[in-house]
Amino acid sequence: MQHLIARYKKAIEGEGESYIPALDGVRALMVLLVVSFHIWQQSWLTPVIALGGIHYSADYILRSGYLWVDGMLLLSGFLLYLPFAYAKEKGGPSPQVGHFYLGRIARIVPSYLLSILVMLLAVALPRQAYSNTGDMAKDLLAHLSFTHNLFRQTYYATPLNGALWTLAVEMQFYLVFPLLGRAFRRQPVITYVSMTGVAFLFRGYAAQLPDTGMWFNQMPAFLDVYANGFVAASVFVSLKKRMKEDKWTRILLSVCAAAAVLIILDMCWKQSMESGQQQIRLGQMRRRYPLSVFIALLMVGVSLGLGGIRVMLGNRITRVLSQISYQMYIWHQVLAVQLRRWGVPPSNSATPNVDQERTWQVGYVIICYAGALIISCLVTYLFERPIVRRFRKLK
């Protein structure tokens, strides 16, 4: 007991204005769910747990794993606005725009360019994925300008890593964030209503189209998700300053987080019941706003809840997993696809996932997770973090 209390106090002491340990675990878990979805797409391996004669399947969690991309963008909005929320609480100046852009470039761009280069030289060119040099130039230019999500060919048919569309959304949002951050600080209600209104109108228009494929994941369709991240950051800062660090307050926030988890799981189950690409996208757009609200509640609840929860989500292991999460997101899907193409591990049929080759499924999943983990650690600590440290010296 004394050991747990000591760990709790250490976790609380480690919290600062720019670092909330519990969110390490939240980030790692959301990335893991997205990774699991993409590996499941290739393996069709669905874990089933038997307890007391009842079988619990993870099928609906895996099938709806893509929903957690919204959670990752929500967390991004939360962390982006957090310095503004602290500045407003203290009556100080807003963060400098130059430092913001420099930090985002250092964090995102080098690893992004490395991924494009590796995929171009190791996959696209050897496979002759482009019919001509013009198509290659268009794909490269769209990716280098972070506009590849705006064109069908570079969004759906690119050989350079389909998972990179989220980085296009992020970079496009970064362009307008300093303006939105300052506007939300001055006029939170008007800014929130405006951002949410634009998102609802954009998704409402998209829902009327016969094909929502090029619309449902564009940056304006996520503005309400980012806005809820702003609100969550503001609520967190306000509660952290004003609430009492007593048992009952922490219990209340933990109960709120637990309730949010149950509601989120229900949303995931209902989303997993959608059938067909169009219905899946429509369901995703319908659930985007409420899902972001309850994930925001979950983030605030675990960040200020019971010490045991904070220790479980904010520790050395989750911190490492959070640090490598960006690389894990970049590399996991392309690795899973390439392993299938290379026939690793070997299988008895051409479609071992369809034929339910259990030995192949288990081996393939293990190799995917292990390979993605190794690649993520190597790129994070040998490439990403050294570059980020160099950029920090420029501030």
Image (cartoon, grey):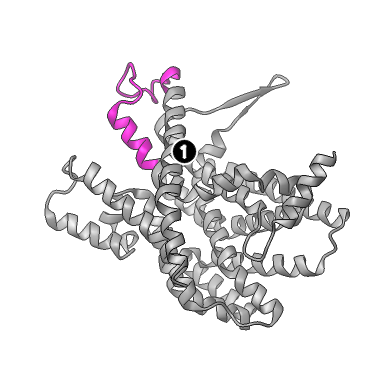
Q: Position of residue 39 (x, y in %)?
A: 44, 36
Please give the name of the residue rendered at 66% of the width and 53% of the height, measured from the top-left corner: 21
Please give the name of the residue rendered at 45% of the width and 19% of the height, measured from the top-left corner: 358
Q: As drawn, is 306 to the left or to the right of 63?
A: right
> Which quadrant holds the N terminus?
top right
Q: Position of residue 391 (x, y in %)?
A: 43, 65
Q: Position of residue 260 (x, y in %)?
A: 70, 51
Q: Position of residue 36 (x, y in %)?
A: 49, 38
What is the three-letter code of the residue carrying label 1?
A: Leu
Q: Nearer the viewer, residue 14 or 242?
A: 14
Q: Is residue 213 above or below residue 375?
A: below
| Residue 246 quadrant | bottom right
Magenta stretch: give its range: 333-360
Q: Judging from the image, what secondary structure is the residue with disc 1 in?
A: helix
Q: Nearer the viewer, residue 295 or 272?
A: 295
Q: Is residue 301 above or below residue 78?
A: above
Q: As drawn, is 369 to the left or to the right of 346?
A: right
Would you say residue 192 sits in the magenta stretch? no
| Disc 1 residue crowd, few under 14, some 14–19, many 20+, Cα 10 Å | some
Residue that carries the numbered disc 1 in the rendered image: 373
Q: As drawn, is 295 to the left or to the right of 11?
A: left
Visible residue check, residue 215 = no
